[in-house]
Amino acid sequence: MNHVVIIGFMGSGKTRAGKQLSKDLGLQFVDLDKLITKKMNLSAREIFEKFGEPYYRALETVALKQLIQDSERKVISLGAGVPLQEQNEKYLKELGTIVYLKGSLTTLKKRLADSKKDPMLDGEDRDDKIKKLLKQRDPVYQKFADIQVVTGEVPFEELIKEIEEKLSTYEKNS
Ligand SMILES: Nc1ncnc2c1ncn2[C@@H]1O[C@H](COP(=O)(O)OP(=O)(O)O)[C@@H](O)[C@H]1O
Ligand SMILES: O=C(O)C1=C[C@@H](OP(=O)(O)O)[C@@H](O)[C@H](O)C1
Ligand SMILES: [Mg+2]
């Protein structure tokens, strides 16, 4: 399918940017986390606590497969962990054009400092955890990215414009 797919670390702005892009492009918006939490009637943290992380990962994969079958083009914001799961690799490649919202460690630490919603940041020192996970995840996001933009350095509206321009160029050439 040729969906517009947004990937990136927690706090990179996947959900916010996805909503704006869907409005501008006149496409339906899907947030993969929202799809899962709505269906389960539980938050991501509650699903992690009740059933464990592997269960959440399985729900992500099921949702991805459904979106590949969906013939109506959409803007899809993925959860930050989706590209890290080996079983998702082939589905991600089939899903559409992948936009990586890249945030620096400084930007992400700032945005995530008070966020309570992410179970992946529970436990150890939050800044250390962000640093460790970003080091592990950034190369994976880069590997999947058809388009990359840096968040945190320009105003939101400019960032969206940059994504739209890059998408248009990418699609013309592919
Ligand atoms: N370009 C941006 N500039 C400043 N703050 C942003 C930007 N994009 C997102 N945010 C803020 O960062 C936080 C995380 O955004 P969100 O879209 O939920 O990220 P994600 O879905 O990638 O975890 C929110 O408070 C959001 O308003
Ligand atoms: O980093 C992760 O593994 C996760 C990120 C979350 O999504 P956001 O990227 O929207 O925060 C959500 O999917 C879940 O809590 C797991
Ligand atoms: Mg999100």
Image: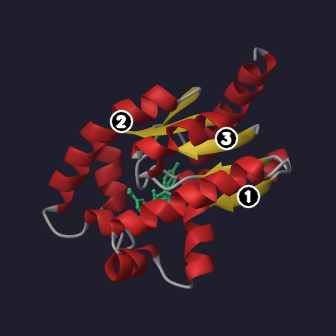
**Quadrant containing the C terminus in the rendered view:** top right
**Quarter containing ligand 2?**
bottom left
Q: Which residue is mark 2?
A: 138
Task: Tell me, yes or no, if residue 21 can be seen here.
Answer: no
Q: State how far apart marks 3 and 2 are (Cα).
A: 20 Å
Which quadrant of the structure image shows residue 15?
bottom right
Q: Nearer the viewer, mark 3 or mark 2?
A: 3
Q: Nearer the viewer, residue 174 or 115?
A: 174
> Hey, what amino acid is under mark 3?
Leu
CB at mark 1 closer than 8 A to ligand 3? no
Residue 110's label in the rendered image is none
> Hey, what amino acid is under mark 1?
Phe
In the rendered view, would you say 110 is above or below 139? below
Q: Which residue is mark 3?
A: 95
Secondary element at image label 2: helix
Q: Which residue is mark 1?
A: 29
Q: Nearer the viewer, residue 155 or 52?
A: 52
Q: Are marks 3 and 2 in contact (CB under 8 Å)?
A: no
Give the residue drawn at x 62%, y 78%: 39
Q: First in sequence, mark 1 or 3: give its number.
A: 1
- Residue 12 spot, x, y in % from top left: 45, 49
Judge from the rendering whether residue 149 lies leftward or rightward of residue 124; answer left or right. Answer: right
Give the residue drawn at x 54%, y 65%: 33
Secondary element at image label 1: strand
